[in-house]
Image (spheres, coloured by chain):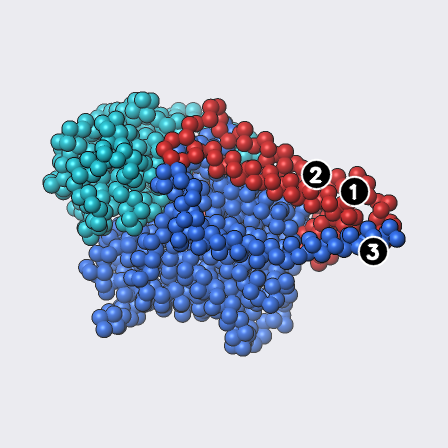
């Protein structure tokens, strides 16, 4: 999407070149998002309730009215967006896309690292209730540091371990938050750790 | 003269060593908790509640009041420094505060923010002290249709904060409203959009959405670009800001503070809509409106003043009526109830000293906040010297803890991470995420007010327009929308004309 | 992603169950570490106050810290799901209140009364109808007569459809007293409505509006209970007015997951009963008009089940 936006602006000065490029291929990435939203907004009203639609009670319009109306309004907005994109394409001037500020600043973006990072964060959340906050946080901080370019084990391990202990003290000790301890053997490990740290 | 005698008594109480220390500690806790991405001041107040058991009721209120005042400001520290709002109300601080940080003006940005916040907070503390009674009856005149109208005004402001494409911003906001309807409907008790997952019945909390959308995408950017956030050396020397700089933006601060005071009194609304509306209005009112989003001082100051101006104002309905208007004041109510104190009209008769001590404490807290804010900001800018990878890892952990801590629910962590991925995609494709957060915050309120209004009026839809206050607010909202849309309508017309001319040109 | 995650979490808990149920955990030294108190609503409400007050007093009794965690959502069901799926070892206790039980009848939640072992019902209060001080109908007779003559004209602020409030209004309507139910989810807005003259009456338990009663801003006109409330001896019961509406008391109890060993429940029960007898608790419950002799054992369990059946029957009509 951003690529087309940039190229669109470059071409603005040359009408002849633009006319030649008014083709479907350029249009597709621009129309994909609004069209998807439009279809989704038209389909989602079916998914408000599971099974039967509850009856309205009292003087109100019922529990489905508000989300239904909002989805219809969203469908209208998607349609306007779609029309704007088509109009812009027709005029050979794609609507200005809010280019991420990073691109504007000319920074390089490592998509591989980004995706790895996202995966790591998801793994963190997924493992949190299973192996407990203590263990998963040590592992996460260590892995993230390695991914972020800190490879020295004498830096990574202390940061991960001491950082986790500080966080444990702060949240499970001082703030007595019931952060997940994990299940089964991990639960016992967490309890032992917490007892060792004097939190329990 | 009774008022001033009571104030003098309150002054004495508030400056007694124990009480004074309580305020200071509360402030520091609030600013630090607020500044940690993921941990909001509401979280911090709930966590602090057990510590108030051992205090006197007045001390408990001073402590929680300090956390409240400090926390509402503290959220902006992380907004300004790392572009992750510490609390939802600090969302607008990202828009013009973070660009200043990227220019190396982090201390300047923090100073402007803390001065504006303290001024706004002070204004509302004075309002609380001298205008509590009349404003309390003003708040009672508001009923559900008025609340609905006020919420609509808040929602409309997304058009004003939209950069270029109002339709896309509106779509984002509507999606947010739909996200806000997930879970048990507040009126009928019917689950909606649960897709067979019982955990979704609890609904999706706006703090969780906000943490996901902003924190995750920001740390991924840190990782993918290896950006350096360390403050530049040149900005670190001498006074970060001169009085002149603040004086230049006095209009923005005054507008923000006034708006925050009014919105804060209304139960149900709160710091976030106040800040966003203030930003929207400032963007229209300021001669530099087109530059907003690139680090304009008044764009940072107005929402800062507005959000802290809600703190004192929100305590008016709590103390005078016994009605907490927000999550933060509900926790204060709990603290008082746990001490056997019932706030409300009786408290003014039975224990006026306590009330006036709280009044004085709110004033003192806002004055002290300038010092506390700059101190904590200094400490955090030291933390910013750590390598970005370490910083990012801890932001993720804090965000997850924060998302979990909202309701101590692991499902909220999953929701947060799902929105994290979504937020990253949105950021990469330029789809605006701030309107979505606003929709999640205000949507459920709007629905509730709407449904209750209709139930109360016997299903009469005209009630929103025929009641004078609600009709006026809706008219204002409409005018605000037109005012905000004017540039883009003008732009579209110009576009149209230009393309017509181009057509002509190519034909010739 | 969320659905998979929820499934995995559920699977994880399922796997955990046998491990934790299996060997009888060391019960002799119970409690030996902090006990988590799950309050099923957010900070500041009636359930929260009860949970916190009790946690504080139980700390003295049991000698371990009892941190309160608010797990709000889905009318208290989010917290109960968490309670029901945590290890039945006495280290997780939670609040179970009437509002949540009534929500099960409306199809919410994924738990049932059998998933819990009710340790003790510690607070209970009948529902009242209050009118604002400025109301032209200062007695129940006047209010009900007006409602009979003008069906639906009077607006009563309640906590929503499908709740005890709603059931009470339905029963009144069946008796010819038809008033409009105006649901307010946020308690603060509910209390503000009659005070600001935006509704004609409010259905509520007295503890939640104590400050308004004391200030004379809200006047109780009728109590839905078998007997008059000792703190409001002048307020007639519904039965005295010829209406058979009672047993819809708003109770609050402490529960543990079903399957918790009896010795542990007994230890908790003993501690709760002692805590409730303390002066501090008595002062607290007097302030909130919720004092009762704690109901324990089988009777407590039956109270919850009976309430559930009653609401379910009523909502079916």
Q: Which type of secondary structure does the marked residue at label 2 adopt?
A: helix
- Label 2 packing within 10 angstroms: few (<14), some (14-19), many (20+): few
Same chain? Circles 3 and 2: yes
Looking at this view, is A72 or C245 the one in front?
Answer: A72
Say which chain is cyan.
Answer: C
Residue C130 falls left or right of residue B201: left
Q: Which type of secondary structure does the marked residue at label 3 adopt?
A: loop
Residue located beneath label 1 in the image:
A26
Residue A190 falls left or right of residue A108: left
Looking at the image, tell me whether mark 3 or mark 1 is earlier in sequence order: 3
Q: Which type of secondary structure does the marked residue at label 1 adopt?
A: helix
Q: Position of residue A137 (x, y in %)?
A: 53, 44
Q: Quadrant of the N terminus of chain C?
A: top right
In the image, residue B29 above or below residue C276: below
Is residue A94 visible from the viewing direction of this image? yes
Looking at the image, tell me whether mark 3 or mark 2 is earlier in sequence order: 3
Q: Chain of mark 1?
A: A
Colour chain B is painted in:
blue
Q: Residue at x 29, y 44 (%)?
A: C199
Residue located beneath label 3 in the image:
A13
Colour chain A is painted in:
red
- Label 3 packing within 10 angstroms: few (<14), some (14-19), many (20+): few
Q: Quadrant of the C terminus of chain C?
A: top left
Is residue B51 visible from the viewing direction of this image? no
Residue located beneath label 2 in the image:
A32
- Marks 2 and 1: CB-CB under 8 Å? no
């Amino acid at each position: 999407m951003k690529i087309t936006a940039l190229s669109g602006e470059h071409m603005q000065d040359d009408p002849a070149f633009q006319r030649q490029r008014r083709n479907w291929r350029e249009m597709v990435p621009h129309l994909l998002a609004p069209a998807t939203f439009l279809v989704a907004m038209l389909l989602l009203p079916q998914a408000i309730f599971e099974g039967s639609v509850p009856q309205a009670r009292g003087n109100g319009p019922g529990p489905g009215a508000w989300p239904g109306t909002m989805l219809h309004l969203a469908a209208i907005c998607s349609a306007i967006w779609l029309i704007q994109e088509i109009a812009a394409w027709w005029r050979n001037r794609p609507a200005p896309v809010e280019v991420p500020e990073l691109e504007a600043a000319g920074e390089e973006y490592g998509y591989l690292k980004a995706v790895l990072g996202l995966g790591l964060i998801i793994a963190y959340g997924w493992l949190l209730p299973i192996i407990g906050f203590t263990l998963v946080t040590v592992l996460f901080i260590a892995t993230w540091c390695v991914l972020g370019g800190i490879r020295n084990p004498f830096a990574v391990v202390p940061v991960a371990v001491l950082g986790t202990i500080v966080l444990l003290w702060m949240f499970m000790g001082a703030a007595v938050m019931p952060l997940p301890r994990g299940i089964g053997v991990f639960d016992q490990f967490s309890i032992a750790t917490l007892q060792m740290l004097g939190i329990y | 003269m009774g008022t001033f005698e009571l104030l003098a008594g309150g002054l004495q109480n508030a400056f007694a060593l124990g009480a004074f220390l309580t305020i200071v500690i509360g402030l520091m806790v609030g600013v630090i908790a607020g500044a940690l991405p993921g941990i909001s001041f509401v979280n911090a107040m709930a966590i602090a509640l057990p510590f108030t058991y051992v205090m006197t009721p007045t001390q408990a209120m001073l402590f929680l009041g300090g956390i409240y005042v400090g926390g509402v400001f503290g959220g902006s520290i992380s907004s300004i420094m790392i572009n992750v709002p510490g609390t939802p109300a600090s969302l607008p601080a990202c828009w013009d505060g973070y660009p200043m940080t990227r220019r190396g003006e982090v201390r300047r940005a923090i100073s402007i923010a803390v001065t504006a916040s303290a001024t706004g907070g002070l204004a509302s503390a004075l309002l609380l002290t001298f205008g509590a009674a009349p404003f309390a009856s003003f708040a009672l005149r508001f009923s559900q249709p008025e609340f609905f109208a006020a919420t609509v005004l808040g929602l409309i402001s997304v058009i004003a904060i939209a950069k270029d494409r109002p339709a896309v911003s509106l779509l984002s906001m509507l999606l947010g409203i739909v996200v806000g309807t997930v879970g048990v409907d507040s009126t009928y008790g019917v689950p909606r959009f649960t897709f067979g997952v019982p955990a979704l019945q609890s609904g999706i909390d706006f703090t969780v959405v906000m943490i996901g959308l902003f924190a995750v995408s920001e740390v991924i950017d840190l990782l993918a670009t290896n950006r350096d956030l360390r403050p530049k050396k040149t900005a670190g020397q001498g006074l970060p800001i001169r009085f002149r700089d603040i004086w230049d933006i006095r209009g923005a601060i005054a507008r923000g503070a006034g708006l925050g005071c009014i919105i804060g009194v209304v139960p149900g609304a709160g710091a976030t809509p106040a800040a966003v509306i203030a930003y929207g209005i400032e963007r229209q009112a300021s001669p530099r409106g087109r530059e907003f989003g690139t680090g304009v001082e008044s764009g940072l100051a107005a929402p800062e003043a507005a959000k802290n101006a809600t703190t004192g104002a929100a305590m008016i309905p709590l103390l005078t009526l016994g009605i907490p208007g927000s999550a933060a004041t509900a926790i204060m109510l709990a603290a008082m109830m746990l001490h056997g104190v019932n706030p409300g009209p009786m408290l003014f008769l039975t224990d006026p000293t306590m009330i006036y001590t709280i009044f004085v404490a709110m004033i003192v807290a806002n004055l002290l906040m300038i010092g506390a804010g700059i101190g904590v900001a200094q400490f955090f800018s030291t933390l910013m010297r750590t390598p970005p990878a370490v910083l990012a890892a801890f932001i993720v952990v804090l965000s997850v803890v924060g998302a979990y801590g909202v309701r101590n629910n692991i499902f909220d962590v999953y929701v947060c991470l799902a929105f994290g991925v979504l937020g990253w995609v949105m950021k990469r494709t330029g789809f605006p995420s701030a309107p979505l957060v606003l929709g999640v915050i205000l949507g459920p309120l709007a629905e509730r007010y709407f449904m209750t209004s209709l139930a109360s009026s016997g299903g009469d839809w005209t009630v929103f327009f025929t009641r004078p206050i609600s009709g006026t607010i809706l008219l204002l909202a409409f005018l605000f929308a037109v005012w905000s849309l004017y540039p883009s309508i003008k732009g579209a017309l110009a576009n149209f004309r230009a393309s017509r001319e181009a057509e002509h040109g190519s034909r010739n | 992603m969320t659905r998979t995650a929820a499934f995995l979490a559920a699977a994880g808990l399922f796997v955990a169950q046998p491990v934790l149920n299996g060997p009888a955990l060391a019960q002799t030294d119970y409690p030996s570490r902090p006990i988590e108190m799950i309050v099923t609503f957010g900070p500041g409400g009636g359930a929260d106050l009860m949970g916190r007050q009790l946690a504080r007093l139980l700390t003295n009794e049991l000698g371990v810290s009892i941190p309160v965690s608010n797990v709000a959502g889905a009318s208290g069901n989010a917290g109960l799901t968490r309670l029901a799926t945590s290890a039945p070892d006495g280290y997780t206790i939670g609040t179970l209140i009437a509002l949540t039980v009534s929500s099960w009848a409306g199809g919410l939640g994924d738990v049932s009364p059998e998933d819990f072992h009710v340790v003790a019902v510690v607070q209970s209060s009948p529902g009242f109808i209050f009118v604002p001080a400025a109301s032209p109908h200062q007695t129940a007779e006047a209010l009900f007569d007006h409602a009979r003559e003008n069906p639906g004209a009077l607006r009563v602020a309640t906590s929503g459809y499908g709740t005890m409030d709603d059931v009470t209004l339905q029963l009144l309507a069946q008796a010819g007293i038809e008033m409009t139910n105006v649901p307010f989810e946020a308690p603060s807005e509910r209390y503000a409505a009659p005070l600001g003259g935006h509704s004609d009456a409010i259905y509520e338990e007295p503890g939640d509006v104590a400050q308004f009663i004391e200030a004379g801003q809200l006047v109780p006109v009728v109590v839905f209970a078998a007997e008059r409330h000792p703190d409001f001896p002048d307020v007639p019961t519904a039965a005295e007015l010829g209406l058979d509406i009672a047993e819809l008391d708003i109770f609050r109890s402490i529960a543990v997951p079903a399957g918790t060993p009896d010795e542990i429940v007994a230890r908790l029960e003993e501690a709760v009963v002692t805590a409730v007898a303390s002066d501090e608790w008595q002062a607290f419950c007097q302030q909130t008009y919720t004092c009762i002799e704690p109901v324990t054992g089988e009777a407590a369990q039956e109270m919850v089940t009976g309430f559930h059946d009653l609401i379910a029957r009523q909502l079916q009509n």
